[in-house]
Amino acid sequence: MATKNEQGHWRNKQGGWVHPDLVSVDKKLEDELVIKLVEEAKQEHERMVDFKTKSFGDCYSFVDLLRQEYGMDRLSGSEVGSVTLKAFDGTAEVQIQVAKLITFDQKLTLAKEKIDEYLTEKTEFADAEIQTLIMRAFEVRNGKVDAKQIISLKSYKIEHPKWLEAMAMIDDATEIAGTKSYIRFKERKDGDISGELNTIVLDLASVPVRAKIEKGVQS
């Protein structure tokens, strides 16, 4: 319900107080619905946090069990890392992927300058597509470059000395800021061992809404 003071007045968007008799019925109903749904969303969020935490713990505990079976101990402070566990018939699996969070220091600017030198020398012969990809790789979005795009430059088989210098500078500029872990749950359609392996969507924004036949309402 809306935030109210001791007199029962409703707080508005400006922080002022409005007598309840001056709040229309539809606004009261809207307020009640929104607060109800947000509270339910918070409860669902907590359930998902608990489920994700438990899922990671269960998977890593299984890996530790395998270690015991082979007489191995996990090193103190070490992380298990990426894991893929599968059902016996292959119709379901759980994947944990650990991705490195890559950042770059100021030497990346020098690498870009060296690449510009290379392109200046090779203007007549440089592949236009490669030039476009290079420009795209160094685009700054939300205050930072896309690490994947930068690292992808190293895949080009270019042997020019300036290009190789630039790639070495990118190596020197690369820093690992940490890691981020993802867990995904997958199952084969209809439990068919040859069926398509589909990800079970847990992202609320991507979860489909079931069609409602009653009252002619469809999602």
Image (cartoon, grey):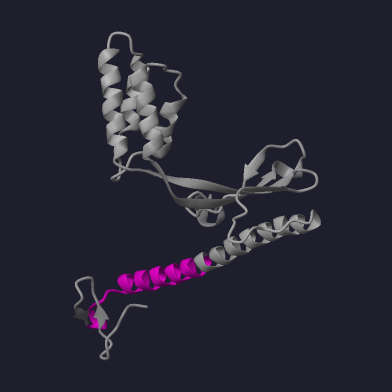
In the displayed structure image, the side of residue 188 where residue 69 appears, left or right: right
Give the residue at the far top of this rendering: 124
Whether residue 211 appears in this view of the structure is no
Q: Residue at x 58, y 60 (%)?
A: 77
- The answer to whether residue 5 is above or below residue 149 is below
Q: Residue at x 26, y 28 (%)?
A: 113
Relative to the observer, which residue lies in front, 64 or 200? 64
Q: Residue at x 57, y 50 (%)?
A: 201
Relative to the observer, which residue lies in front, 214 or 122? 122
Whether residue 142 appears in this view of the structure is yes
Quarter occupied by residue 153: top left
Q: What x and y, as percent, mark residue 179? A: 49, 51
Relative to the observer, which residue lies in front, 63 or 143? 63
Q: What x and y, as percent, mark residue 191? A: 75, 44
Q: What x and y, as percent, mark residue 128? A: 33, 15
In the displayed structure image, the side of residue 46 where residue 143 appears, left or right: left
Quarter occupied by residue 135: top left
Q: Residue at x 64, y 62 (%)?
A: 57
Q: Which residues are magenta?
A: 19-44
The answer to whether residue 23 is magenta is yes
- The answer to whether residue 112 is above or below residue 34 is above
Q: Main secondary structure of the magenta part?
A: helix
Q: What x and y, as percent, mark residue 134? A: 34, 26
Relative to the observer, which residue lies in front, 29 or 84? 84
Q: Can you say which quadrant of the picture contains the N terminus?
A: bottom left
Q: How many marks?
A: 0
The answer to whether residue 42 is magenta is yes
In the displayed structure image, the side of residue 40 where residue 56 appears, left or right: right
- The answer to whether residue 138 is above or below residue 143 is above
